[in-house]
Amino acid sequence: MKDYDKDSYGHILKYTSLFGGVQGLNILIGLVRTKIVTWLLGPGGMGLASLFQTTANFISQATNLGISFSAVRNVSELFDTGDEARIAHFIKVVRAWSLLTGLIGTLLCMLAGSILSQLTFNWGDHTLHFVVLAPLVGILAVTGGETAILKGARRLRSLAVIQMYNVIAALLISVPVYYFFGESGIVPVMLLTGLISMLLTIRHSHKLYPLRFSGMHGILGEGMGMVKLGVAFTLAGIFGSGADFVIRTYLNNVSSLDEVGLYNVGFVITMTYAGMIFSAMESDYFPRLSAVNNDRAKCRDLISKQAEVSLLLISPIVVAAIFLLPIALPLLTSEKFLPVVDMMRLMSLALYLRAVNLSLEYLSLAKGASLSYLFLEGVYDLLIVVLTIVGYIYFGLTGTGIALLVAGLFNTLLVMGYIGLKFGVFVRKTIFLLLLIQLAIGATAFFATQWLSGWVYWLSGTLLFIVSLSISVNILRRKTHLWDKIKAKIHKKLEK
C-alpha cells in the first residue's frame, strides 16, 4: 500500500481515536452521572427530562436555520484559502446570524409554551416550564455557531477539550441539584449545563477569532448562501427532532412517563457508545470532505476510507455490547431498566449500517446539495416514526429496536443508490464485503444471546468478539503506519 494511502488512513484513525478517546472518558464520566441521575429520578423522571430536552431541541432545530452545520462548509473552504481577512469577516456573518436565530427561537418557545404543553403532556399544565426553558434555545443557537467556527478552522483539540469539560460540568451540576430538588431541578439543570457549554465554546472560538463590531452594516445579507443550505438542514433537523418528539410523545400518551424513560435511556446509551466512533465525523471528516467536494475521485476515496475505519472500529464494540448488556446496564443505571436490553441489542446492530450511511450522507452537504440531504433525511425520519409506532404496538420496546434496524437497512440501500446515481460516487466494493461480514458476526451474536445461556453464552461471546476484533486489527495494521510506530517504540525501549 502506498504511503499516501497509509497516511490518509492514519489521519482518519488518529482523529477518530482522538475524539473516541475523549468520548471514552466522557462516557465514563457520563455513565457515572447516568447511574446517579437514574437512581435519583427513576424512569419517570428520566422520561420527563427526555420530553423537555426533545422539545427544546425541536424548537432549536426549527429556528436556527442550520447555521451550526452549514457554516462549517463555508468556513472550511475559506480556511483552505488562507485569507485571514475573508475568514474573519465571514465569522462576523456567522455570529450575527447565530444571535438573530437564537433570539427568534427563544421568543417562539416562550410564546408557544401553552401549545407545547398540550402537545407533549396529557396531564397537568407545563406552560411555565417551557417559558423558563426558552433561553436554552438561544443558548443552543449561539453555541452551534461558535462550534461551527471551530470545526471549519479545524480546531479539533479545542472541540475535544470542550466536550470533556461539558461532561464534567454536567456531572457536577446535575447530581447535587437532583439530589436536593428531584424532578423540579430538571429545567434548571438543562439551562445551567447549556450555559456552561456556550461559555466554554465562546472562550475557545473568541480566542481564535476575537469578537469585532466594525463592518457589521448589512452583514446579514452576506450570509444568504449559508442560510440557503442551512434552511434545508433546518428542515431535516425538524424532521429528525420532530421524529424524536413524536415518538416520545406517543409513548407518553399511550403508555407512561416510565416507558418514555426506559426508551430514552436505552436509545441514549446505545448512541453514546457509538459516539466514540462517530464524533470525529462532524469535526474532522466533514470539513475535509467539503474541501474536496468538486473532485469525484477524491470524494470516493475519502468516503470509502472513512466508512471503512468507522466500520472496523465500531464492529468489536457492538459484539461486546450485545453480550455484556445484561450485566452492564444494571451497573450503569439500575435493574429497572433491564426491559430495554433486547431493544438496545437490536439498535446496536443498526450501528454497522450507520457507519456507512453517515460517511455517504455528508457528501450532499459538502456539495451544498441541500434538497438531496433533505430528501434522504425526510424519508428516513418518516420511516422511523411509522416503524417505531408499529413495532411498539406489536412487540413493545423491543419492537422499537427492530424498527431502528429495519429503517437503517432501508436507509443504507437508499443512500447508496441515491448518492451513486446523483453524484456518481460509490463506495468501494470491499466496503460492502466488510459490512456483510461484520454484520453477520453481529447478527450471530444477537441470536446467540437469545438461544444460549451459561458458560456456552460467554464462550460464544468471547469467540465472536475475538473474530470481529481480529478482522479489524488485521486490516488496520495493513492500511496504516500504526503497527510500524508500535514496533519502533518497542525497539527504542529494548535498546535502552
Image (cartoon, rainbow, N blue to C red):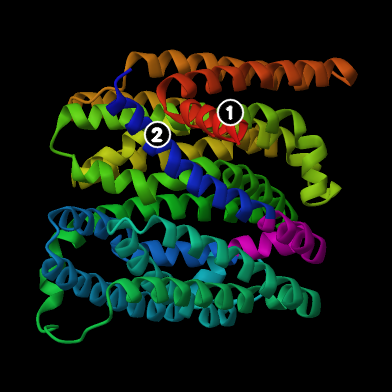
Q: Earlier in the sequence, mark 1 or mark 2?
A: 2
Q: Position of residue 42 (x, y in %)?
A: 79, 60
Q: Which label number is shown at residue 349?
A: 1
Q: Which label number is shown at residue 238?
A: none
Please indicate whether residue 385 sits to the left or right of residue 217 in the image: right
- For the residue labelled by badge 2, is the local secondary structure a helix, a strand or a loop? helix
Work out which quarter of the rendered image holds the N terminus and state it. top left
Query: Magenta stretch: dominant SS?
Result: helix
Looking at the image, which is closer to me, 58 or 167?
167
Q: Position of residue 316 (x, y in %)?
A: 61, 27
Q: Position of residue 110 (x, y in %)?
A: 45, 81
* Extent of the magenta region: 29-51
State the residue lying farthest toward the front. Answer: 496
Looking at the image, which is closer to me, 313 or 447?
313
> Which residue lies at the image location 56% right of the left edge and 67% below the top edge?
165
Residue type of the residue flagged with mark 1: Leu
Please indicate whether residue 210 sits to the left or right of residue 400 in the image: left
Work out whether residue 399 can be spotted: yes
Please indicate whether residue 371 sits to the left or right of residue 402 in the image: left
Work out which quarter of the rendered image holds the C terminus and state it. top right
**70 up-or-down from 395: above or below:** below
Residue 217, picture quadrant: bottom left
User: Can you tell which of label 1 and label 2 is closer to the viewer?
Assistant: 2
Looking at the image, which is closer to me, 467 or 217?
467
Q: Position of residue 16 (x, y in %)?
A: 46, 42
- For the residue labelled by badge 1, is the local secondary structure a helix, a strand or a loop? helix
User: Dot 2 corresponds to which residue?
Assistant: 10
* Magenta-drawn stretch contains 19: no
> Which residue lies at the image location 18% right of the left edge and 47% below the top edge?
368
